[in-house]
Structure formats: structure tokens, C-alpha cells
Amino acid sequence: MRNDSQLVYNAPARVFHWLTAGLLLVQFVLAWSMPEVHRDTKPVGLIAWHLGVGVVILLLVLVRLTWRVAHPAPPEPATSPRVMRTLAGLTHIALYALLIVLPLMGWANASSRDWPVALFARIPLPYLSSPGSRFGHALGDWHANLAWVLLALVVLHVCAAIYHHLVLRDGTLIRMLPTSRDSKSTS
Ligand code: HEM
Ligand code: HEM
């Protein structure tokens, strides 16, 4: 027999999830509060924070994915229709993909502007495109546009979590809550 704790994501998975969500919120606030970026803009103030938080999100998601590959998700509530489970899986894959591709595009755009990028403001990272590169420049537009796609997916994801909780009442949200009891035997 399976008990409730076996349906819950393990503690590191939950910490990674809420840390990513919190940092992403900060990152969008920074993106929309920072000055508009022009040819002669300097990467200081809120722009520097946007670059710094962005590479931390990238690192966090890479560590999170590594953890996730080694620790599969707990079994899903049997009440969820198969089509919903498939859609949820596809949304999660798209979220992970965007959380990697989007920061890489922003980083390549920063390189094309000859803006150095550092991890934790200490560890210098390599350039992803050469300064003045047209490709790196074009990625800036893609970066800003794809951020809207990410935001739309996050809204869909949050609506689905609320629907599971309030309408289906199948315990899906509980699986990811930081306060849930940890499971030693799954994921
Ligand atoms: C998941 C992480 C990230 C999100 C959600 C995000 C989001 C955004 C958004 C919404 C904008 C458009 C701001 C506006 O409307 O003016 C933007 C612009 C920008 N971001 Fe990010 N960003 C992320 C990561 C990064 C990283 C890692 C870097 C660089 C290391 C970066 C560098 C930039 C640059 C240079 C721009 C200006 C692009 C241009 O106008 O050509 N971003 N970002
Ligand atoms: C804001 C940015 C967010 C991102 C990027 C995000 C991303 C993800 C990802 C990638 C997963 C899949 C975990 C895995 O199996 O590896 C997941 C699961 C989950 N998330 Fe989020 N999430 C966010 C916010 C939220 C919020 C605000 C809620 C609640 C209202 C939430 C509720 C859940 C739940 C309940 C699961 C487990 C789903 C299941 O068991 O099928 N997420 N999230």
C-alpha cells in the first residue's frame, strides 16, 4: 500500500521549485523596471542585477534538472485524466527548456554588447557571442519575446495547479508545497 507521503515531491525538489519560482518573479520585476537597453547603455544598476540573477537562475535550473533526472517525480494521483497528465508533462518540459534557452539568449546578447557576465558577481563567465555580433544582437529580441511565452506557460501552470486543488481536489498541489511531509521512499 502507498501512503500519502509517497505522493509528495522530495524536499530538494520542492526547494528547487520554489527557489526557481521566487527568483523568476524577481527577474521579471527587474526586467520591467530596468532602463531600456540601447547601443550605448552601460550594464550597471538594475541591468547588472538582471544579468546576475539570470545566470543564477540558469545554474539553479541545471542543478535542479540533474537532481530531477536522478530522482523521478512521485506517482501522480490516479484521478487525473491521462490527457491532463500528458499536457502537464509537456508544460513542465517546455518550462525547463525555456528556463535554459532564455538565459542563454540573454547572455549571448550581453556578450554581443561587450557586457561581461559573472556568476555571483565574482566568477567571470565566457562570452557566448563576439562583441558586435549581429546574431547575438538578434537574440536580444528573441530573449524578450520568449520571456512572454515563459510567462504565459507559468500562468497556465499556476491555473492548472489551482484547478487541481479547488476543483479536482486530488492533492496535486500538496505534492509540491514546501510544508508537505517528505517522502523517504520515492523520488
Ligand atoms: C529566466 C531568466 C530571464 C528572464 C525571465 C528574462 C527576462 C527578460 C525580459 C522580459 C526582458 C525584456 C525587458 C524589456 O521589456 O525591456 C529582458 C531583456 C534583457 N535580458 Fe533578460 N531575462 C532572463 C535572463 C537573462 C540573462 C541570464 C541575461 C544575461 C546574462 C539577460 C540579459 C538581458 C538583456 C541584455 C536584455 C535586453 C535585451 C534587448 O533589449 O536587446 N537576461 N530579459
Ligand atoms: C513561477 C514559476 C514556476 C515555475 C517555473 C514552475 C515550474 C515547475 C516545473 C518545471 C514542475 C515540474 C517538476 C518536475 O516534475 O520536475 C513543476 C511542478 C509543479 N508546480 Fe510549478 N512552477 C512555478 C510556479 C508554481 C506555482 C506558483 C505553483 C502553485 C500555485 C506551482 C505548482 C506546482 C505543482 C503542484 C507541481 C507538481 C505538479 C505535478 O505533480 O504534476 N508551481 N513546476
Image: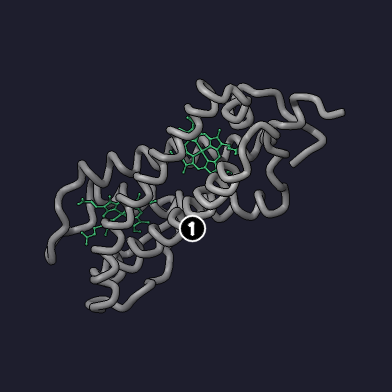
Return the residue nearer the eye: 99 or 49.
99
Return the residue nearer the eye: 18 or 55.
18
**Left or right placement of residue 47 versus residue 174 in this view:** left
**Left or right placement of residue 18 versus residue 36 in this view:** right
Q: Residue at x 38, y 47 (%)?
A: 53
SS category of the residue bearing label 1: helix
Q: Position of residue 52 (x, y in %)?
A: 37, 51
Judge whether 162 appears above or below 34 on screen.
above
**Left or right placement of residue 67 versus residue 138 in this view:** right
Q: Quadrant of residue 66?
A: bottom right
The amino acid sitting under disc 1 is: Ala
Q: Position of residue 154 (x, y in %)?
A: 41, 42
Q: Quadrant of residue 171?
A: top right
Return the residue nearer the eye: 180 or 165.
165
- Colour scheme employed for the rendering of this structure: one colour
Q: Residue furthest right?
A: 1
Q: Residue at x 49, y 28 (%)?
A: 163
Q: Residue at x 80, y 25 (%)?
A: 3
The number of numbered discs placed on residues in the rendered structure image is 1
Q: Quadrant of the C terminus?
A: top right
Judge whether 103 appears above or below 2 on screen.
below
Image quarter for ligand 1: bottom left
Q: Is label 1 within 8 A of ligand 2 (CB to nearest ligand atom)? A: no
Q: Position of residue 116 (x, y in %)?
A: 32, 64
**Left or right placement of residue 32 versus residue 89 in this view:** left
Q: Residue at x 26, y 76 (%)?
A: 131
Judge whether 168 appears above or below 59 on screen.
above
Q: Quadrant of the N terminus?
A: top right
Residue at the disc numbered 1: 97
Q: Quadrant of residue 177?
A: top right
